Image (cartoon, grey):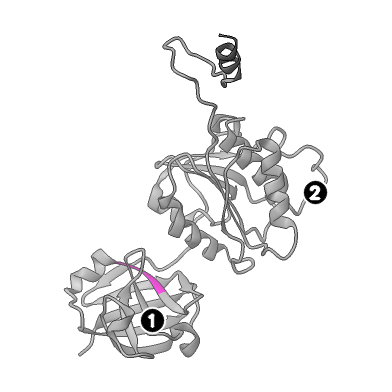
Amino acid sequence: MKRLLLLLLALPVFAVAADSAPVAPARAAALVIQTDFGTKDGAVAAMKGVAVGVDPRLPIFDLSHENTPFDIWEAAYRLKQTAPYWPAGTVFISVVDPGVGTERASVVLQTKTGHYFVGPDNGTWTLIAEDLGIAAVRRIDEQLNRRAGSEKSYTFHGRDIYAYTGARLAAGVITFEQVGPLLEPKVVSLPYQKAARDGATLHGTIPLIDFHYGNVWTNIPDALFAELKPQPGDKFQVTILHHGTQVYSGVMPYAHTFGEVPEGAPLLYLNSLLDVAFALNMDSFSKKHGLSSGSGWTVQVTRAP
């Protein structure tokens, strides 16, 4: 009996609700961070330190810190590329902010899918707002949602405002309503060529270079490409322009996989987002032809004659 009593005393103790079910501890939402800071210094670690200081249980993840410095468009597309695959409630912090310390607003965007985006309203939310929809936008009240002692810091809002606010929101320390005053349900939007069809020609932009392999991605979706009734092996004329000046023109086959064409040969394929893309099998299409990405880069696709 004495041994049984000792065993019972050693068992973990759970809080018990009225229905006698154990009460689980509150679970923090995921916090996903994107910057153009790189990881050679302590900037990203400082942001994570602020977040952990809010709640050590926060699950913190990196989206990317190797974005092209000052390239807001690239940051916007990285969010489009990744955010839909995270569960509702996830809080994203995105800091590509060449206007840090200026009058651009610091906001939290709540999408209709239940995701939250924390950072400067400088165009970063362009594609997320289109794809996931705007539920509400609130301006961050920096009197309430700013790291204590940072009032004299004007150039590191990623640490002092965004990491602090994002962590508090993800941890449930504050609600979305406590972020700050409600704004109009709109955000700053960067101009770009939206995917469209003009007769037999598809038009779009190059939002991103798959930099590791040099593949060129477009914003022309599978559904629009399907209007040309493509079959594997069909040839397409591809023209790429930079601010209206032709940089590349060539014919390539539509293929499902890279291995369907010889090594070094071009192909048109659907990328992981099911958008039209161009590549060289086991080579860099963008490097070979001097191509880049952004709103100034446009594409035209039509069936080859």
Element at badge 2? loop
Q: Is residue 169 part of the magenta span, yes or no? A: no
Residue under label 1, please give it.
279
The answer to whether residue 157 shows anywhere in this view is no
Graded by Cα atoms within 10 Å as few (under 14), some (14 to 19) or many (20 or more), the crowding at tag 1 reads many
Quadrant of the frame with the N terminus: top right
Above or below 21: residue 150:
below
| Alpha-carbon span between mark 2 and mark 1 | 45 Å
**Where does the magenta region start and end?**
217-221
Q: At x 45% / y 9%, what residue is drawn?
A: 18
Q: At x 44% / y 17%, what residue is drawn?
A: 21
Q: At x 69% / y 49%, what residue is drawn?
A: 47
Q: In the rendered structure, find residue 58 and report the number of the disc placed on it.
A: none
Whichever of labels 2 and 1 marks the residue nearer the N terminus, that label is 2
Secondary structure mainly formed by the magenta segment: strand
Between 300 and 257, which is closer to the camera in this rendering? 257
Element at badge 1? strand
Q: Is residue 53 left or right of residue 15?
A: right
Residue under label 2, please give it.
153
Quadrant of the frame with the C terminus: bottom left
- Amino acid carrying mark 1 in the image: Ala
Above or below 194: residue 303:
below
- Amino acid carrying mark 2 in the image: Ser
| Residue 167, quarter of picture | top right
